Amino acid sequence: MTLHGRCLCGKVKVEVDDSKEPVTTALCHCTNCLSTSSGVASVVSILSEDSVKLSGTIKQYEDKTTSSGKALTRSFCSECGSPVSSVSPNFPGKVVLKYGLFGQDHAGKYPKPGVEIYCKNKNPWEPSIEGVKSLEGSF
Ligand SMILES: [Zn+2]
Ligand SMILES: [Zn+2]
């Protein structure tokens, strides 16, 4: 099956071939995801590069102040600023896709995350999710 997503303005489009591997999602509570998502976590899927097709004009930001200590490249829509993806040396050959891209067309249908990372940054009022592995740091 092919999943279709897009940024807020629609100029960046993404296609995910989820027949190659199961789409697994994670919640990332690292401080830089809090900044870029303006939320309490980024919802991300870690996928093989070759199962993700991105199109549109993308702006890249070299994030050198990551919680893991390794610089990664964050991509955004150059028009509306929606977070699109990250590429990290921690995940060679993979793309960390922002699941918010699917919000416009798949709201309410996000798969349940398998893991939450950087939970040390969670607020006291954030609930834990039953059955989801919770890590203080990263994988
Ligand atoms: Zn956009
Ligand atoms: Zn993060």
Image: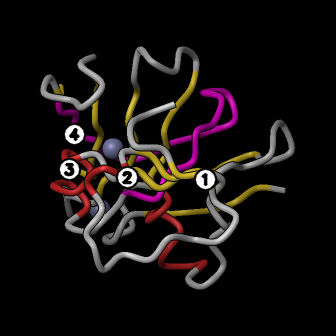
How crowded pointer 4 is (Cα within 10 Å; few <14, some 14-19, many 20+) is rated as some
> Residue, x 30% and y 50% (percent of image)?
120
The residue sitting at 61% across, 52% down in the picture is 133
- Pointer 4 residue: 59
Q: Which residue is mark 1?
A: 25
CB of residue at label 1: within 8 Å of ligand 2?
Answer: no
> Is residue 115 covered in magenta?
no
* Amino acid type of the residue that numbered disc 1 sits on in the rendered structure: Thr
Q: Mark 1–mark 3 contact, CB under 8 Å?
A: no
Looking at the rendered image, the disc whose residue lies closer to the viewer, 1 or 3, is: 1
- Which secondary structure lies at badge 2? helix
The tag earlier along the polypeptide, 3 or 2, is 3
Query: Principal SS element in the magenta part?
Result: strand
Q: Earlier in the sequence, mark 1 or mark 4?
A: 1
Residue 76 vs 72, above or below: the answer is: below
Ligand 1 near label 3 (Cβ, under 8 Å)?
yes
Q: Amino acid at mark 4?
A: Lys
Disc 2 designates what residue?
119
User: Looking at the picture, how far across and down is residue 99, in whole percent?
Assistant: 50, 59
**Does 43 lie within the magenta span?**
yes
Residue that appears at 21% across and 30% down? 66
Pointers 4 and 3 in contact (C-beta within 8 Å): yes
| Start-end of magenta stretch | 42-61
